[in-house]
Amino acid sequence: MYAGHAAVALALKTREPRIPMAVLVAACFGPDWVELFLGLFLGRAAGETYSHFIPGVLLGASAAALLYAVVFRRPGSRWVAIGWLSHWPADFLTAHKPLIDPGHVVGLDFYDLPKVDFLIEASLLAVAAWLYMRAFAPDTLRRRWVAVAALALVSVQSVLDYGLQHEPWRQWNPSLARAQWQPHLTVASSGSTLTPLRTALALSPASIQRGRDGEGRTPRPGDTGLPHVR
């Protein structure tokens, strides 16, 4: 996400006017800057992982809030942290980002639907610019400047999405969970084999069967040799 992060910075400025706009913009884009820095030493893949997985985002938000409090010595550090934390859910809309396990990424991947991505980011920016104008642009001249800045960001976003649309290898691939199944409870059966125990906490019988043999057949109650536990 590009324009969307700037939109979040504009919206946060209306909540705490005393924070310099440059600080909020830096916070909202913070994980990307950390990714760039780490990529110089660890490689691009590792840089993206450790800057964008949730523990790294939490650590970065805490460090950014502390740095702001020490340097500026004024209220508002929590909004700096919120700006940094907002980066992950914003990126969740447009790409795949790691959770706690760096090898497990999730996201709606709208980068691979560039028109949808443009609509989302332009809408966020329009709402944020309207909020900003209400708070800080009481006269026509200032509102025009805010509108011009918003249009400039939308223009940059349109160029980025246009470029994405003309990459033929792209294919929309939203991901919300691992492509594997593990039972909540198991019981020993023959030998060392573990058989899933179906309980109210487990997945549906069809999911259990898919996890066991890769097929979508719905098992009958006697398939596992165990009573159906409610």
Image (spheres, rainbow, N blue to C red):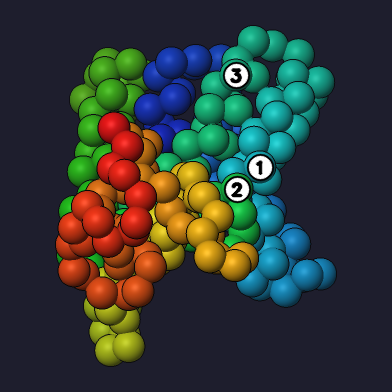
Q: Is residue 70 left or right of residue 141?
A: right
Amino acid of disc 3: Arg
- State whether residue 211 is above or below residue 101: below
* Disc nearest the viewer among 3 and 2: 2
Q: Is residue 211 left or right of residue 64?
A: left
Q: Earlier in the sequence, mark 1 or mark 3?
A: 1
Q: Say few, some or many: other residues with alpha carbon within 10 Å of mark 3 (under 14 / 14 to 19 / 20 or more).
A: some
Q: Position of residue 74 (x, y in %)?
A: 69, 11
Q: Say few, some or many: other residues with alpha carbon within 10 Å of mark 2 (under 14 / 14 to 19 / 20 or more).
A: few
Measured in 3D between alpha carbons, the distance from the residue under mark 3 to the one under mark 2, in whole angstroms, is 23 Å
Q: Say few, some or many: other residues with alpha carbon within 10 Å of mark 1 (under 14 / 14 to 19 / 20 or more).
A: some
Residue placed at 22% from the left, 52% from the top? 221
Q: Position of residue 140 (x, y in %)?
A: 21, 25
- State whether residue 132 is above or below residue 215: above
Amino acid of disc 1: Pro
For residue 136, what is the image quadrant?
top left
Q: Position of residue 97 (x, y in %)?
A: 49, 57
On-image quarter of the N terminus: bottom left
Measured in 3D between alpha carbons, the distance from the residue under mark 1 to the one under mark 2, in whole angstroms, is 6 Å
Q: Earlier in the sequence, mark 1 or mark 2?
A: 1
Residue placed at 71% from the left, 37% from the top? 59
Which SS class for mark 2?
loop
The reply to whether callout 1 and callout 2 are in contact (CB within 8 Å) is yes
The answer, for residue 197, to whether it is visible in the render is yes
What residue would you read off at disc 3? Answer: 78
Q: Is residue 155 left or right of residue 41?
A: left
The answer, for residue 90, to whether it is visible in the render is no
* Disc nearest the viewer among 1 and 3: 1
Measured in 3D between alpha carbons, the distance from the residue under mark 1 to the one under mark 3, in whole angstroms, is 18 Å
What residue would you read off at disc 1? Answer: 55
What residue would you read off at disc 2? Answer: 100
Which SS class for mark 3?
helix
